[in-house]
Amino acid sequence: MRPAPLWRRYDRLSGSDPAADVKDELRFHLETKVDDLIARGWSPENARKEAKRLFGNIAAVQRLGERIGEHMERRRRLSDYWADALWDLRFTLRMLGRDAGFAVVSILILTLAIGANIAVFAVVNTLLLRPLPFPDAHQLVWIAPAPRKCGFACATYSADAYNRFRAQSLSYQDVTGYFAFSTADNLRLMGHGDPQPATGIMVIGNFFKVLGVQPALGRLFTPDESRRGAMPVAVLSNAYWRRQFAADPSIVGKAIDLNGMSTTVIGVLPAGFDFGAVFSPGGKADLFQPLILEDARLMGGIVTMIGRLKRGVTLAQAQAEGTAVEPHLCWRDDIAASCGFYSQDPNPMRLRTLKDYVDLRLRRSLIVLWSAVGVILLIACVNLSNLLLARAAARGKEFAVRGALGASRGRIARQLLTESLVLSSAGALLGLGLAFLLLEWLAHQGSLALPLLSSLRIDGAAIEWTALTAAFATLLCGLVPALRMAGGQLSEALKDTSAGAGQGRSHDRIRSILVVSEIALACVLLVGAGLLLRSFLQVLDVDLGFQPDRAAAIQVDYDDGGNVPNAKPEDIYAHRVAIFSQILSKVRSLPGVTAAGMVDYLPMEQNREWGAPVPKGSSINANNLPDTLAYVVTPGYFRAMGMTLRGRDFTWDDGPKSATVVVLNETITRFLYPGQDPIGKTVTLNGGDVQIIGVLRDVRDSNAENQPSWQMYFPATQQGPAGMQLIVRTAMPPSALASGILHALRELNPYQPAAEFRPIRSIVDRASSPRRFFMMLVTAFALLGLILATLGIYGVIAYSVARQTQEIGIRIALGASASHVRGMVLSETLRLAATGIVLGGVASLASARFIASLLFKTSPSDAATYAGMAVGLLVVALISGYLPARRASRIDPIQALRIN
Amino acid sequence: MDTSKLEFLRGTLDVLILKALVWGPLHGYAITDLIRRQSDDALLVEEGTLYPALWRLENKGLLEAEWGLSENNRKAKFYRLTAEGRRRLRQEVKTWEAYAAAVAKVLGAARPPLPEEMA
């Protein structure tokens, strides 16, 4: 074989072509054959025919050859590609190993940004994207009036309304509900040493069946167990079964003593069912008992309704049916006047999927958080892009040489992208670890009133999201430098021996643009965080109507004889009053206790509604007034809570035989008695006359942010309370008195469980915990963004000083003072920062409108926040510019001029 | 014997091609030529089977191809053995010889084999 001449080597210049190769090869064969035949004496014509005949089916062979050729070509390209990639990877690792500082900083930046992104994604995925942990969860519907700011009290229906709704609605496989007003630790479990507090939830018998929850052990309720007079039974939550009964596998069928009542355990729920996580964020539920609807009829609006739609029924169809059924619902079937009660309610029934109900309040916050971490990722990538660009510029000559030696622009761009791929993959892996730690921590924050918190975890979707984030970061970090270097003039770079020539200048411009956009993004985050912080401070500043500090509450157990059959009501009252006054006088006598009182529902926890009071003799229809929150209290409660009362407090003398009395809040009296003094006036309540003895300054009843509802207070001497909380106001931190008070209660009642001694402050904090948590997260993200932006400014200024060393050296040699040089560098810093702040301010104004609904008493264009952001950023920018400025002013001109 | 109808046993063509390339790179036409002459015109390789066999061997990495100029000054595709191809050839030759010897023993036998236990 002789080698092919040069010109022939280039006839495949435009790339390989397997089809043409096959054709050429076969043509050569035929021509040679023809030559042979001619040499053997054939005529050229016949020789050609013979050669073709001998070959047989040329076309088929040719097709086969093309197929094999293409296959080989593909394989060759692929193996070339991987060989190149492997080479790039090795080279990158070597480069990064040589510049470990750069590698560590950039991987750290990416770890923080990607980790935050994964963690927030996991939260968003759990709360917004993933279906609720029930089978066919999309069929589950929350049936309630449109949301108002009074919590459960306006989201419940009476037992009769429930029964009728269930009977008349055709859209549902079944409708269920649960008793909405259970308080924490409302039961005491006996027989395990000291009485143990437990939280029991009453659910309608079919509750678990409708949700699709199967017991882990035993069975669910039978219809008979929900009838009056049935043997008491209970189903345990999995956590309670493990905690209290050490996961006893033979618990089913055993009897436990709840409040002195022998109750049979019939089942244990699966670990995957967490009632609190879905229905009462931050709350716990230890065991479930069937709600006896016949007994619950007289209790008013007590159940929340949840339905499971039939297959194929849409929410809109169910809504239309619900609107039609609602006027037929009665508060009490035997009171004709109460029929149609629910459709008179100012907020008609509005159906939502259970999922919407669970994440309604969080949706917007979560989307804001998601955007915030997205911005963090952008800032981190821009930052890294800048760092990589600086490195690439420093390596300009290396690339130019490689280009001159035949490396294509694509290869050089690939090399740069490989670097950013290595960095972002490392960042993604570490970020996954960081997110894991964050979520572990978050999932155990039981004090946060966020739903589904305990089911936070890194799942397949989160890992996919990680990969997506890493790919995004790779492109974002690597693309600008890659395009820049690959597109640059190679010969320019080769000639660019002195820093400061053309290429350098245009690099500076890109780097400045990157830094300005970084500052602008950080601005948006800072403004958002600032607005949320202001809102939070405003919330803390709200006058709650009571003093939460130095006060604590404990659930009190008492036996007033109400369980004894045929007990006379007046005996029960007398008994109860005696118990309460005894407890209070005993507790008040303890050293350090300044006041004590009792109430059945604490503000910012559960509540209950009764019909509104109407001034006696007025023509106002009580049905047109808002339902009113009702509290039953002992004398001294207002003082113990630090509430402000005008008029007189209840006394022990307000007994069953004296005139019935009530204390109303200002919101009611302002409406019922505009411009008059309500004290001493008489209102009609449930058909009876009640005298107003005092007006209470409004108390925030659901949380600090919502306006107070209508509230009224009755004395425990005249009304039956639903359980009792003892409130103690102390001169020292309340926790110091906890054991003394529990001891005093035990002396009076050996059955008093070791219930939690809860500072009132913690109840208030808990009510604002979602806002606090959200504010803290956004602030943390904003600080992270600020740090990254600062690094960015520092990087750009330091680099530009290093690049201008010669120029600055000349200036100093020509007599420029150190302060002049410093000023020059600082003014460059300020120019970048100011541009970024102005752009960021404009972007913030636009984006702040999006979070307006999350703000509290704070305008989205709050001037103080914007001014604070601008000043803060400028100061930080100046600090980060000062270091390079000082370095610049200390340049030794002689050394600077000698560099090249 | 009608040489043109002498059919190759399966796999035999591959080993013949490998053998033909032992002395140096050849193009397809020269390979048929070499096999024909080496076998005193007993073995005629059909073009329709030769080229697919060459491409298959190239695809398996037993051959390498390169374009060059033929003796009649035409552009031709030359095949050469790779190290892998050389190794395969040695192995195939051994197998073939063992096979051929065994067949020859059977065909050349003058009397039936002795009973097994006496052998």
Image (spheres, rainbow, N blue to C red):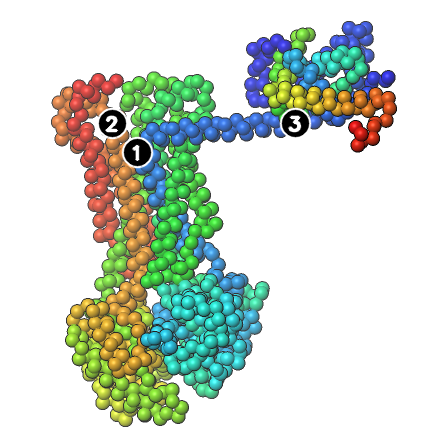
Residue A677 image position (x, y, % from top left): 21, 82
Amino acid type for the residue under numbered disc 2:
Ala
Amino acid type for the residue under numbered disc 3:
Ile
Between discs 2 and 3, the one toward the N terminus: 3
Determine whether, in the image, residue A662 is placed left or right of residue A257: left
- Who is closer to the viewer here, B23 or A399? B23
Number of numbered discs:
3
> Circle 2 — which element?
helix
CB within 8 Å, label 2 to label 3: no
Q: Residue A187: in sight, yes or no?
A: no
Residue visible at 53% across and 77% down in the picture: A222
Residue visible at 50% across and 63% down in the picture: A134
Judged by depth in the image, the label closer to the viewer, 2 or 3, is 3
> What is the chain identity of the residue bearing mark 1?
A
Residue visible at 54% across and 74% down in the picture: A169
> To which residue does mark 2 refer?
A802
Residue A688 in the image: above or below residue A497: below
Residue A450 image position (x, y, % from top left): 37, 61
Q: Are marks 2 and 1 on the same chain?
A: yes
> To which residue does mark 3 refer?
A68
- Who is closer to the viewer here, A11 or B4? B4
State the separation of the CA atoms marked 1 and 3. 50 Å
Q: Are marks 2 and 3 on the same chain?
A: yes
Q: Residue A568: in sight, yes or no?
A: yes
Quadrant in the picture for the N terminus of chain B: top right
> To which residue does mark 1 refer?
A101
- Who is closer to the viewer here, A503 or A399? A399
Residue A572 occupies quadrant: bottom left
Between discs 2 and 1, the one toward the N terminus: 1
Residue A526 in the image: above or below residue B71: below
Between discs 1 and 3, the one toward the N terminus: 3
